[in-house]
Image: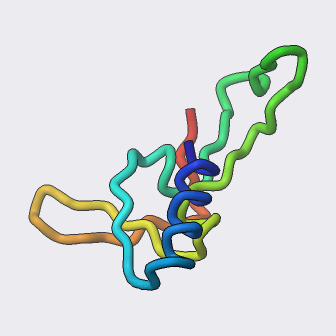
Amino acid sequence: MNNYSYEAITANQAANPGKYIAVVGAAHANTHEITSGPAPTVYGTQLPSKFPGLGQLLDVPAVQYNAGGNLTQLRPENPTTV
């Protein structure tokens, strides 16, 4: 999903420069790291244990909406883990 979103946003930005908001879950905002065991294997190919999030792919800050109505920047050095 992250690569598809990256490609869609960058292609659209080339034709329509501007600002974007991408609403995604925490696992897609920053680097997602699998720590609960080995990385999964798909069709005989082992996937990496870390996947870059949209924040890393687009070089933009990822933010989180808090219950108090404020936005807080998610730190890329604290990736989402499962």
Q: Position of residue 33 (x, y in %)?
A: 65, 42
Q: Position of residue 65 (x, y in %)?
A: 23, 61
Total tally of numbered discs in the picture: 0
Task: Residue at 50%, 69% (x, y): give it.
Answer: 12
Task: Residue at 61%, 53% (x, y): give it.
Answer: 31
Colour style of the rendered protein structure = rainbow
User: Which residue is outermost to the right?
Assistant: 44
User: Which residue is outermost to the bottom?
Assistant: 17
Residue 53: quadrant of the picture: bottom right
Pick whichever, 78 or 14, lies toward us.
14
Q: Position of residue 82 (x, y in %)?
A: 56, 32
Q: Is residue 28 above or below residue 66?
A: above
Pick whichever, 43 or 27, lies toward us.
43
Q: Position of residue 26 (x, y in %)?
A: 43, 48
Task: Residue at 47%, 74% (x, y): give it.
Answer: 61
Q: In this image, 4 relative to 51: left or right?
A: left
Task: Residue at 64%, 50% (x, y): give it.
Answer: 3
User: Which residue is outermost to the front?
Assistant: 15
Q: Quadrant where the N terminus lies?
A: top right
Residue 18: quadrant of the picture: bottom left
Q: In this image, 9 relative to 47: left or right?
A: left
User: Which residue is outermost to the left?
Assistant: 68
Residue 16: quadrant of the picture: bottom left
